[in-house]
Image (cartoon, grey):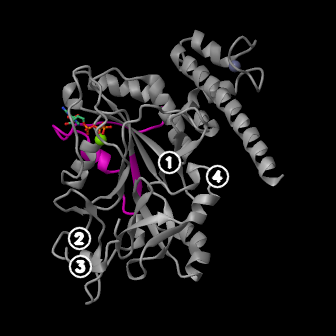
Amino acid sequence: MAPQGRSARQAGGSRPKIACADPGGRPHWRGRRSGTGGTFTLELKTLGWGPFFASSFEPYAREGHRPGRVTAVHRGAYVVATEDGEVTAEVTGRLRHQAAGPADLPAVGDWVCLHGGPDFGRTAIVAVLPRRSAFSRHQAGKVTREQVVAANVDVVFLLSSLTGDLKPRWLERYLTMAWESGATPVVVLTKADLSDAVDEQVVEAANVAPGVDVHAVSVVTGQGLDELAGHFEPGRTAALLGSSGVGKSTLVNHFLGREALATAAVSADGRGRHVTTHRELFLLPGGGMLVDTPGMRELQLWSADDGAREAFDDVASLAAGCRFSDCRHQAEPGCAVRRAVEDGELPADRLAGWHKLQRELRALEVRHDQRARAEQRRRRRVVN
Ligand SMILES: Nc1nc2c(ncn2[C@@H]2O[C@H](COP(=O)(O)OP(=O)(O)OP(=O)(O)O)[C@@H](O)[C@H]2O)c(=O)[nH]1
Ligand SMILES: [Mg+2]
Ligand SMILES: [Zn+2]
């Protein structure tokens, strides 16, 4: 994991100005060529830097640290984009030690404080700056731990393929998590060229996702791609989420204008092959950034109270008419939500989806409590 020296970056001087691939397909982070020294500088603004991060970075700046944005994580090694190009860095033992869980370590999209660099040997990540937003899930496995899928994301594209049935519960769950993350969700229905009921499917999705943009797209016909690109903006970060095989990497390749990522046909039963195995942030030629992610086998909620409220905006506003303010819309008298279902105003499976989510959130609360108690016991043991 040799740090990339200046000479390595200079060698690519004739390449296009932004993220471009070498023959190995690895993206390079580079920006304007400045001055006559031949060093590359990438304006931090281009990467999404702004007053929010600058203010928490201040104390680190005084200590001579540099800021950078994590673009990929490979087994303990972090690829970080900085003003003078891409570096490979490791977290300091201290940061690792202080982390209460994986969520405290850098994730793709995080702004980090760097120490050292090409001229001083190894680059170390000494701190992770507070996140503006974070898309989190339960880490796969039995232990309750938060895993940050992508940090500082402004827009979350939720992809579902038009070749299969829309899974309303899936969409509700992802919408909940997207709202909870602090990002704005956008529903993207892929492979429009393979469906002959696109309009109906768009309406169906829009019903599950009130107030959310729904785009039907196809990389084969080009349908909807310009509209989708309308969500990109310099300094803004979008992340692609969805099951394996829905076409996430294909979209990244399209918007990058090159085959940066491997893609593969879905198997005969319609399942994806889990081609992408790690998350990565790319800078788009026209400005803005896009995070590709592996298709998730398991997407468990982390915490989603506010997110659930937004994803079920329709249920929430009906609930205002319930007799009891803590109505669970089950057997309570004067329940406005169940009345709306009876009157055909609210689809019954919308309410069923809401109930399912509430059950999950309660189960999650219990697990959080258990974990908090275990953590307390551990701390006591350490102290004694
Ligand atoms: N017909 C058609 N095929 C598409 C479209 N978009 C993607 N595909 C195909 O769908 C397959 C899966 O695409 P990928 O981009 O690898 O899917 P992914 O979401 O990145 O999958 P994972 O990396 O496994 O999570 C590939 O064979 C693509 O060529 C589309 O708009 N139309
Ligand atoms: Mg992929
Ligand atoms: Zn009610």
Q: Nearer the viewer, mark 2 or mark 1?
A: 2
CB under 8 Å between discs 2 and 3: no
CB under 8 Å between discs 3 and 4: no
Tag 1 secondary structure: loop
Q: Is residue 307 left or right of residue 197?
A: right
CB under 8 Å between discs 2 and 1: no
Quadrant for residue 99, please give it: bottom right
How far apart marks 2 and 1 lie (CA) works out to 29 Å
Type of the residue with mark 3: Gln
Q: Is residue 321 left or right of residue 272?
A: right
Q: Which residues are magenta?
A: 210-239
Q: Which mark is residue 211?
A: none
Tell me if mark 2 has few (under 14), some (14-19) or many (20+) residues whose alpha carbon lies within 10 angstroms of its own.
Answer: some
Along the viewing direction, whichever of 22 and 292 lies nearer the viewer: 22
Image quadrant holding the N terminus, namely bottom left
The x, y position of residue 149, in whole percent, is 47, 46
Q: Which mark is residue 17?
A: 2
Residue in the image at 41% along x and 35% along y: 296
